[in-house]
Each structure stands twice: as structure tokens, then as C-alpha cells.
Amino acid sequence: MMAGAVRGLSARLREVSGLLAGRFGRPEPCVHETDPVRNLVLTILSQNTTDANRDRAYERLAKRFPTLPALAAARPSELEEAIRVGGLAKAKAKSILGALARIREERGGYSLDFLREMPLPGAREYLTSFPGVGVKTANILLLFSFGMPAFPVDTHVLRVTKRLGLVPGTSTLAKAALSLEPHVGTGDHGPLHLNLIRLGREVCRPRNPLCAECPLLPVCPEGKRRTKAHPAPVRNTLPGVPRNVRLEGHATGGSGGAAAGGGRSEVKRSRASLSHGEPRTESPSEAAQPKGKGCNT
């Protein structure tokens, strides 16, 4: 990559990080396990599932097997049953038990502390040599357990960075992570990772992204294209009506007429739906509010 392009990517990531921090703030430290081996187990459990199911699977695992030696001695069927709520139990149990057996054989115990002394690329290469551990899993472990400047890219981060034009549209999770990582500012790998995930979940959704509400719209080519092609509807300010209800035909100025009548009928339908207990649609501004603490990986 040419020097100008490198500087450009670094500058764009700084700008993106600043805009996200302006909307969401700087995230608090993640609640991932800090012990590297337990974090490896937790991160394997997080693959292809929700945070809630990951946490439930880990809680059940920890209750059934309270120590790493007990976990390593578990029968595959026992571990599968304990973590079933997290999905892909058979594959995850195999990865966890295989990793623990290899660490015990190579290191004489259940410790990955030796990775602290290794350069980031070497530590990542070691972790990704375990079956079932990819670049994302390795980077999560290296970032949150060791504080290394690794940059995990999940599906949310990949979608957002593609739409921003920061990575090619053909990028994989691993390629995007390795491409972006050197250009993230010092100390910003964790906050940027977490804020990009939050944006991807709440605003830059796979379907119907809320581009008009996005803090990155000024720097997002895809967002500008979408908002130009589909302007956001004018939101009403009438009391008792959700702000996300579009007042079709409502007259914003002038008096009476068919247009105003159309607006009144739309308001009546909206109030009727609320009175009959239909679920209230969350507005984009409300959707951007925090849903709770915890790591978003």
C-alpha cells in the first residue's frame, strides 16, 4: 500500500473513532474474562451466537466444571450438554477440549502467559494454529487479556467498514482485521472495536440501516448514496403519537384541504393501534441508547 493511502486510512479511522466516541462515548472495559485460558474458552463459546446465550453457556460450564483441570477432564458429551444453550455444542466442545489438552501437553499446565513476551504476529499465529480458533478469536484474546494492539473484526465491524469504504467489498473477517489493525490509533483498538459493533447493531443494520441517524453519515459513501436515493421521512411532533410515525399527506403549513385530512386520518390510525396494545416501534434515537454493559464481541 502506498504511503499516501496508509496515511489516509489512519486519518479516516481516527475520524471514525472520534465521531463514534461523540455519539457513544468511550466504552468501559469489557467484561470478558481476563485470564487468558478462560478467555479463550469464553471466546470459543461466543462464536455464532448471541451475547446472552454465550454468557449462559459459560455460566453453566463454570458451574459444572469450576476449575480448568476439571474442564479438561470432562467427557465431550458432558461438556456438550453444559454448553448446548450457546449452539454448535459439539464443535465448540471439541475445540475447547482440544485446546486445553494441547496447552497442558506443551506448557505443563493451563497457562498462556508466555504469549505476553511474544510479538503480536507470533502470538496470533500460535493461537490460530488451534483448530476452531481463527483471527477474530485470537485477536479478542490478545486484545482483552493481554492488552495487545490487536483489532478483532466481527460481522458488524466488517459490514460497517465495508460501507465506509475502509476495506474492499470482498474482504473477509481475517483480511479486514489484518488490513485495519496497523492503522488504528494507539489505545484505540478496544474502544473502536466496541463502538463499531454497537453502531452495527443499533444503526448500521444489515437491513434497513438508519443512515439518516448515523454519526458516520458525513464520512460514509454508502450512507450518502442511500439517503440521497431515499430521503428520510419527516417525523411528526404531535403529542401522543410516536415520533417515528410518518404523517402521510400531513400539511406542514397552510390550512385545511385534503392533505391535512390525510394527516389526521393517519394520526387516528396510529392512536388506534396504540390503544389496542400493538407494540410501540422504537425510534432510531431511542435505539441508539445503551442496552446494557458488557463486551459486544
Image (cartoon, helix red, strand yellow):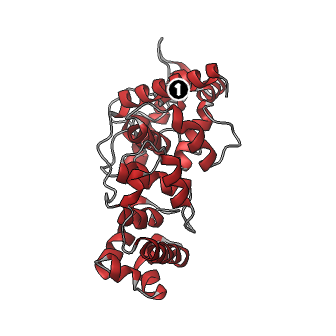
**Crowd tier of the residue under label 1, counting other residues whose Cα lies within 10 Å: few below 14, some 14–19, many 20 or above:** some
User: 121 and 131: which one is in front?
Assistant: 121
The residue positioned 51% from the left and 60% from the top of the image is 127
The residue positioned 39% from the left and 71% from the top of the image is 57
Answer whether residue 276 is visible to the viewer in this image: no
The residue positioned 60% from the left and 24% from the top of the image is 224
Quarter assignment of residue 221: top right
User: 188 and 281: which one is in front?
Assistant: 188
Instruction: For the N terminus, give its image quadrant.
Output: top right
Secondary structure under the numbered disc 1 in the rendered image: helix
What amino acid is at disc 1?
A: Ser
User: 289 and 151: which one is in front?
Assistant: 151
Give the left or right position of residue 76, taking residue 208 as reference: left
- Residue lying farthest to the right in this orientation: 170
User: Residue 121: x and y, percent?
Assistant: 53, 48
Q: Is residue 87 above or below residue 284?
A: below
Q: Is residue 115 above or below residue 196?
A: below
Quarter assignment of residue 270: top left
User: Residue 42: x and y, percent?
Assistant: 40, 65
Q: Which residue is mark 1?
A: 10
The residue positioned 63% from the left and 45% from the top of the image is 175
User: Residue 73: x and y, percent?
Assistant: 39, 85
User: Residue 102: x and y, percent?
Assistant: 48, 74
Answer whether residue 117 is visible to the viewer in this image: yes
